[in-house]
Amino acid sequence: MRVCVLAKTLVVAMSVTLLAAGTAVGQIGQGEGLLTFNGGYVTASSAVTDRTIDGGVISVTFERLDWKSPFSVGFNIGYASASGDSGSGNSRVETSTNSIPVYVGGKYWLGKSKIQGYLGAAIGVYFSWLDREVVATGESFSSIEKTGFGLGVPAGGTFSIGETVFINANYTLNWLWDNELLKDDLLHSFNLGLGFKLGT
């Protein structure tokens, strides 16, 4: 039931996000589409275990860039899972904090060579839930679901390795407002990815 409700909510949020992104992108004129697939490392302070947790993150970004302007507009969806444990011996519990942020935002680009940098900002929604597993017995259960507003601030750069392919690297600070699973509502991600220019 929890997964079903989450999936339905995610579909609605993605539909609204895509509509908003499409409207915003249309306002900057004909530009070049950029599709980027990222993966990397994520870390945060857990409010549940009162410890630092870490794990992995994957995401996909589509944005439209007008090469006559230093700005791009687009949308991003990702999945991050950070885990840690608490207790010891038979009472040791592995805790995993999972989040799906869905953002609409923009970037300001620097440079016009093969190497370019950018600084961005994005706003949207997030979905978070907690998975726990008792290590000694293997018993697992989910609890604490949270949905709210999110803010993402990416900073990074790209390196072109061909006419239509580039490498992307960035750091993104995610602020997941009123997220009771995270001690300071912050999720830090370090990403490396591959991007494709889709033409005008």
Image: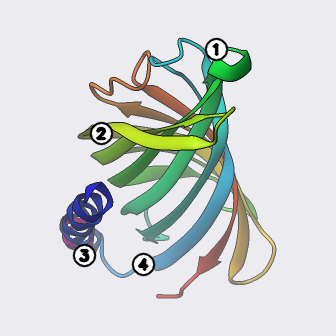
Spatial separation of the CA atoms under disc 3 and disc 4? 9 Å
Measured as percent of width and height from the top left, residue 162 is found at 79, 80
Amino acid type of the residue that numbered disc 4 sits on in the rendered structure? Gly
Return the residue at label 4.
31
Start-end of magenta stretch: 19-23
**Quick one: SS at disc 3?**
helix
Residue 132 visible in the current orientation: yes
Identify the residue at image location x=39%, y=30%.
175
Residue 21 painted magenta:
yes
Query: Quick check: can you spot residue 72?
Result: no
Front tag of 1 and 4: 1
Q: Which mark is residue 124?
A: none
Kindly identify the amino acid type of the residue bearing the numbered disc 3.
Answer: Gly
Q: Which residue occupies 31% across, 39% down?
A: 150
For marks 2 and 4 on the same chain, the one whose residue lies earlier in the sequence: 4
Q: Amino acid at mark 2?
A: Glu
Residue underneath mark 1: 87
Q: CA distance from mark 1 to mark 2?
A: 23 Å
Residue 25 percent across, percent down from the top left: 29, 70
Q: Which residue is mark 3?
A: 26
